[in-house]
Image (cartoon, grey):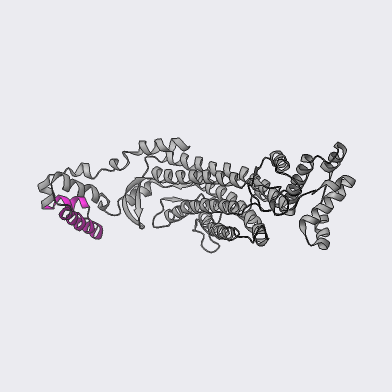
């Protein structure tokens, strides 16, 4: 992933140096689990070193990256190097080391996902009673509270955090089963010792490679988490529109929104999240296509994974940090929310009037609906308060409805306590 969308800690996990260091971790753990090497030889193996440059140079001859690495590491260990890679095949090293890298990535990404939950929950509590209009199809529906809206995003973020944790855990699986996965040169007990030392679970049947549905599941979880971030970002983008302006991204001192128009403050971070979420979805599709390999192993997945696994983990880490900063720094315009509630001149109270006519006046639902629909549309079209139109409506007057009670915002958030009690369970 390009530096623009990378945070240092995650990016460092996917460098060539980090990748080969994970290979070395596997090779050393395997030697330590063997019965062959002496104590002195193990010390030499543990002290063995490599450089990316030396491996790259050796690969020009071997045309095989793991073989080149083994040659360099073995040479560094001296005579003890004969035990390095003993009984192993390349996939034992590659897939087990990849599991180590993914585990380390998850140890950064999952806490980041949990931080977003906390940020959204905190802002939700802050705006528990901040009234705003709810929209369906982009059109004013009924009032809600901005806190309830944010609580929904917090719950989704929590589900994604749980999914990510589960997906990283099931991908933390290695295999040291040798060629075609039969342990012909090793044993299941040897594999168990190696994986225990590395803190990884075992692939039950590796067929030489760890099954790629595991990696596909991880990238699906990452893509789904990205979609959740995109949903939050899309909401903020809509709320920042000039015609709405109920909330907006933080805007730093010295920041410029447009090179040409000094007045502009654009939702660029939200738009960035929306765009990068598309990359995650594309990578997830590629991961699904990696599942079907030929027979016990081919390497059609390898070139793909060298791109999609680093990029997806780096991106979701970056996007989670961006979304958390947006949640924490989001500017909320309460007064504008109140103004926007009045745009329809009271038409958004239509359901309360409808139900009152049915319950209190004993009207047939369709008759009541037509009265409220007609007056509500007139209110909206003519900028006349719906309450005035209803007061002049004979059927409403005869029903003796309490218009003060009907045109009251408080009932719309009367169950906020119940909703926020649920929020306390996750945050």
Can residue 127 be seen here? The reply is: yes
- Per the rendered image, the range of residues in magenta is 366-393
* Snapshot quadrant of residue 53: bottom right
Most foreground residue, 2 or 111: 111
Q: Residue furthest bottom?
A: 260
Most foreground residue, 336 or 109: 109
Which x, y percent locates residue 417?
A: 36, 36
Main SS, magenta region, reads: helix
Which x, y percent locates residue 111?
A: 58, 41
Which x, y percent locates residue 144?
A: 34, 46
Most foreground residue, 260 or 366: 366
Q: Quadrant of the N terminus?
A: bottom right
Say left or right for 67 vs 288: right
Is residue 254 magenta-colored? no
Is residue 377 magenta-colored? yes
Kindly identify the residue that appears in the image at 73 percent across and 51 percent down. 178
Can residue 254 be seen here? The reply is: no
* Snapshot quadrant of residue 367: bottom left
């Amino acid at each position: 992933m390009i530096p623009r969308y990378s945070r240092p800690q995650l990016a460092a996990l996917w460098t060539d140096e980090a990748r080969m260091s994970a290979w070395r971790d596997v090779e050393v753990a395997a030697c330590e689990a063997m019965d062959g090497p002496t104590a002195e030889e193990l010390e030499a193996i543990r002290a063995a070193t490599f450089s990316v440059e030396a491996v790259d140079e050796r690969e020009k001859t071997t045309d095989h990256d793991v073989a080149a690495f083994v040659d360099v590491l073995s040479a560094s260990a001296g005579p003890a190097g004969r035990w390095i890679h003993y009984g192993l095949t390349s996939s034992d090293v590659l897939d087990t080391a990849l599991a180590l890298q993914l585990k380390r990535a998850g140890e950064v990404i999952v806490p980041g996902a949990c931080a977003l939950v906390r940020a959204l929950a905190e802002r939700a509590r802050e705006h528990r009673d901040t009234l705003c209009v709810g929209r369906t199809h982009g059109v004013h529906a009924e009032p809600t509270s901005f806190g309830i809206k944010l609580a929904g995003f917090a719950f989704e973020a929590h589900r994604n955090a749980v999914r990510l944790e589960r997906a990283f855990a099931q991908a933390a699986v290695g295999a040291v089963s040798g060629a075609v996965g039969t342990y012909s040169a090793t044993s299941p007990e040897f594999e168990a010792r190696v994986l225990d030392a590395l803190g990884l679970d075992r692939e039950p049947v590796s067929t030489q490679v760890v099954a790629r549905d595991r990696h596909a599941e991880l990238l699906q979880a990452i893509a789904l988490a990205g979609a959740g971030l995109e949903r939050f970002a899309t909401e903020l983008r809509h709320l920042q529109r000039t015609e709405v302006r109920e909330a907006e991204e933080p805007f730093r001192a010295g920041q410029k929104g447009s090179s040409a128009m000094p007045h502009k403050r654009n939702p660029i971070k939200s738009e960035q999240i929306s765009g990068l979420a598309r990359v995650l979805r594309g990578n997830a599709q590629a991961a699904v296509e990696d599942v079907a390999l030929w027979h016990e192993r081919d390497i059609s997945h390898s070139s793909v994974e060298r791109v999609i696994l680093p990029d997806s983990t780096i991106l979701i880490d970056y996007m989670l940090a961006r979304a958390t900063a947006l949640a924490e720094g989001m500017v909320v315009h309460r007064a504008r929310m109140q103004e926007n509630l009045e745009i329809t001149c009271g038409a958004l109270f239509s359901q309360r009037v409808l139900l009152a006519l049915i319950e209190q006046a004993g009207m047939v639902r369709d008759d009541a609906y037509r009265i409220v629909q007609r007056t509500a549309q007139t209110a909206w079209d003519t900028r006349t308060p719906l309450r005035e139109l209803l007061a002049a409506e004979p059927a409403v007057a005869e029903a003796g409805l309490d218009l003060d009670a009907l045109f009251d915002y408080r009932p719309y958030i009367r169950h906020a306590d119940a909703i926020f009690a649920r929020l306390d369970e996750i945050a």
